[in-house]
Structure formats: structure tokens, C-alpha cells
Image (cartoon, rainbow, N blue to C red):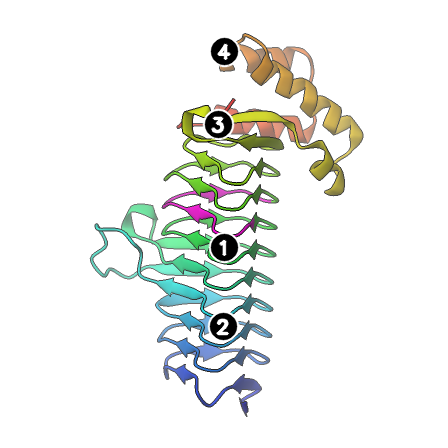
Amino acid sequence: MRAVRGVEIHPTSVLHPGAELDDGACVGPYSVIGDRVRIGKETVLDSHVIVEGSTSIGASCRFFPFSSIGTVPQDLKYRGEDSQLVIGDRNTFREFVTVHRGTQGGAGVTRIGNDNFIMAYAHVAHDCILEDHVILANAVTLAGHVLVQAHAIVGASVGIHQFCRVGPYAFVGGYSCITRDVLPFVKTIGYRNEARTYGINSTGLKRKGIRREALLELQRAYRILVRSRLNSTQALARIRQEGLQSPEVSLLVQFVETCERGFIK
């Protein structure tokens, strides 16, 4: 490795003159960094990593071998227009992860927040948004325009349809095929129209520090929303009538109210 202005660069790597690297960044063997790429402090690229396009990466991220970041979207409507990928701090991208830039149809940007863990072979398509503390297990595939909210966990080999949302603190079981929104705080698993929920993810929420009182309210709200014979509008009205007003229940209610594709019951 050679040090250039506080940056460690392996002699076999290829850096475009237009790339910008902050102090403490490290570029490993045979990695390729393109024009207009910005890499933050203490971020490490292992061997054979490719980063290209208008891509901004924050501090203390880690990219394992053969990850491909910021390449052009897999969208037949894409015609080479300028678009972006914005990545926050302390994210981990394991082997063979692919993350694509945005398109005009999605405001031109793909966004990944902070403290996310993306396991091997996962794919984050154009115009997706990952908030903070998200885990995508091995071979998760996000189609375009998918929103995965904070603290969600998506199990191995899950496929998620375009424009779907995965709510905060949701847990999606491995090998599911998701074509509707996934409720916050809830365990969901299954294939397309056969997917169903399996109650509040109590164990995971306790580990995240959710209060016992909030868990009890969530469980009650879930039973009204999913297990009763009420439709969604009636269920939300019943939740309000029963005075379930914790911040967690309010978030669940807001999520249901803003569903456009419907949600998995």
C-alpha cells in the first residue's frame, strides 16, 4: 500500500483523477474508483471493489471483495442521464453486493442511510431507500423504488416488488416474495398472495429496547388490525377508540393510512 495525503492506495488499484478520498480511506488491490466518486474518512474498500458514477460514500464504511457500487441502473428507460447514489456512515457491504444509482422516475437518487448491514449477494436496485440500522441478509433482492425503513430485518433470498415498503422494525422471513407493504413491528413470511403475518416481533423489539407497555399496545393494535373481521378503516377507528396512543402504535397507524399497494395481513 502507498499513502497519498493520508489515504492508503494499493498500487494495483485504479483511481480516476476526479475521485475524492478523505483522510484515512483505504483502497485495496485491483479496486476501481471512477470519476465523481467521493469516499469519506476511514472507509475501507477491500480488493476488487468497483465504485463509479456520481456516488457519495460517508465515513467508516466497509466494502468487501467484488462489491459493485454506483453502477448504472437495470432500467430499460434509463438513457444515460445523470443520477446519484448517496451512502451514509458506518455501512457494511459484503461480497458481491450490487447497488445501483437512481433514475429520473425516482428523483434520480438511490439512498442508503447509516449503520446498515448488507450481506453477500444482496441487490439494491435504482431509486431504493434504506433508512438506518437495516439488515439485508444474503441474496435479498430489492426491485426499484423499494423503501426499507429503520431497524427492519429482511431474511435471506427475499424478493421485494417495486414500490413496496418495509415498515420500521419489521421482520421478513427468509425466501419470502413480497408484493405488498410489510407492516412495522410485525413478523411477515410467505410467497406473494400467500404471504401472511405472524404477530408482533416481541423478541426482536425487546432487544431493541422497546418498552413493555408499548409492546402490549402493539399486540392489541395488531389483533384489531389483522385478526378482527374489521376492514382497515374500521380497524384504525377501533384502535383510536381504545386509546392506543403509544408512539409505536401511532407509527403503525400512520403506515397503514399511507399504504398505496395494500399491506400483508
Vertical comparison of 234 with 53: above or below: above
Real-space Cα separation, disc 3 to disc 1, in angstroms: 27 Å
Residue type indicated by callout 1: Ile
User: Residue 235 location, x and y as percent?
Assistant: 56, 13
SS at circle 1: strand
- Using residue 131 as the reference point, say whether residue 37 is left or right of it: left
Tell which circle, 4 or 2, labels the residue nearer the N-terminal end: 2
Circle 2 residue: 39
Looking at the rendering, which quadrant does residue 25 occupy? Answer: bottom right
**Comparing marks 4 and 2, which lies closer to the viewer?**
4
Residue 147 locus on image (x, y percent):
46, 42
Determine whether the residue tagged by mark 2 lies in a helix, strand or loop. strand
Q: Amino acid at mark 3?
A: Ala
Could you classify mark 2 by the number of other residues whose Cα lies within 10 Å: few (under 14), some (14-19), or many (20 or more)?
Answer: many
Where does residue 65 sit, x and y in percent of width and height? Answer: 49, 70
- Which residue lies under the disc numbered 1? 112
User: In the image, which residues are magenta?
Assistant: 136-150
Residue located beneath label 4 in the image = 231
Q: Residues within 10 Å of mark 3 (few under 14, many from 20)?
A: some
CA gap, disc 4 and disc 1: 34 Å
